[in-house]
Image: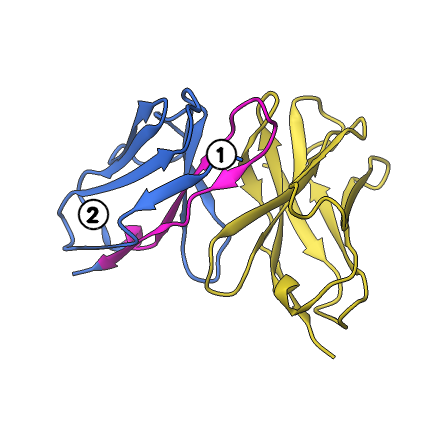
Amino acid sequence: QVQLQESGPGLVKPSQTLSLTCTVSGGSISSGGYWWSWIRQHPGKGLEWIGYIYYSGSTYYNPSLKSRVTISIDTSMSQLSLNLRSVTAADTAVYYCARGRGGGSCYFDNWGQGTLVSVSS
Amino acid sequence: EIVMTQSPATLSVSPGERATLSCRASQSVSSNLVWYQQKPGQAPRLLIFGASTRATGIPARFSGSGSGTEFTLTISSLQSEDFAVYYCQQYNSWPPEVTFGGGTKVEIK
């Protein structure tokens, strides 16, 4: 059973860059057919897809976040990363990494436990 | 962007009763629809994919139906562990974007 674990700072200052890492274990991040993804959830709110990356490096981003987001993958370390630039308090959320399955788009069959990131000075 | 609308926002149900949750897409997503369950402090858990196929380990009391723009999740006989928030999500192939519904909270009546 694949497991995903998010890590990174729990507090980021406004205007700075939020950087998170997701380590994948129990399965190969280089396996074809999966989209490695970031999803967030504002406190007490619903789910928002941020973007996903294939092991080859192909990416798709949420258009509403695309100008500030970069997702990258390091297959040698079995990790994916999220960089979200110029953050504000509105970026305070629980950030999840997840494994996506599907063709052009995907659904998520394995999730990390999530990590809360607060944006505050 | 395909907008997903779930109803009702909150559903009050007694244990043992049937719960019916709805999800509507702003345009056809064929059968590219999943349902998740989320309990407080936990990540979402995949229940149903392809609109009607239960994920591994999901009890038979959970069933999904629908296609196109109208979808339903039915829990045939609510157990105590089923009280949670349920989200639908479309994964239509193009544009390759993911959108979630706003969620339905199933609470104890």
Range covered by the magenta-colored residues: B81-107
Q: Secondary structure at mark 1?
A: loop
Residue B84 position, x and y percent, is 34, 54
Amino acid, disc 1: Ile
Q: Quick one: A104 or A28, which is closer to the camera?
A: A104
Label of residue A86 in the image: none
In the image, residue B102 lies in the stretch drawn in magenta:
yes
User: Where does the image place residue A54, in percent across and percent down from the top left?
Assistant: 73, 29
Label pair 1/2, CB-CB below 8 angstroms: no
- Label 1 is found on which chain of the structure? B
At 51% across and 65% down in the image, what residue appears? Answer: A43
Find disc 1 in the rendering and name its residue: B2
Q: Position of residue B106 (x, y in %)?
A: 27, 54
Q: Nearer the viewer, residue A68 or A118?
A: A68
Picture quadrant where residue A7 is located: bottom right
Q: Dividing the picture into quarters, in which one does residue A73 lie? A: top right
Q: Is residue A95 visible?
A: yes
Residue occupied by mark 2 = B78
Q: Which chain is blue?
A: B
The chain letter under disc 2 is B
Report the residue at 70% width, 69% height from top: A10
Q: Is residue A81 above or below residue B57?
A: below
Q: Gap between marks 1 and 2, in whole Å?
A: 31 Å
The answer to whether residue B55 is visible is: no
Amino acid bearing label 2: Leu
Chain for colour yellow:
A
For residue A44, above or below residue A78: below
> In the displayed structure, does residue B43 sit left or right of residue B13?
right
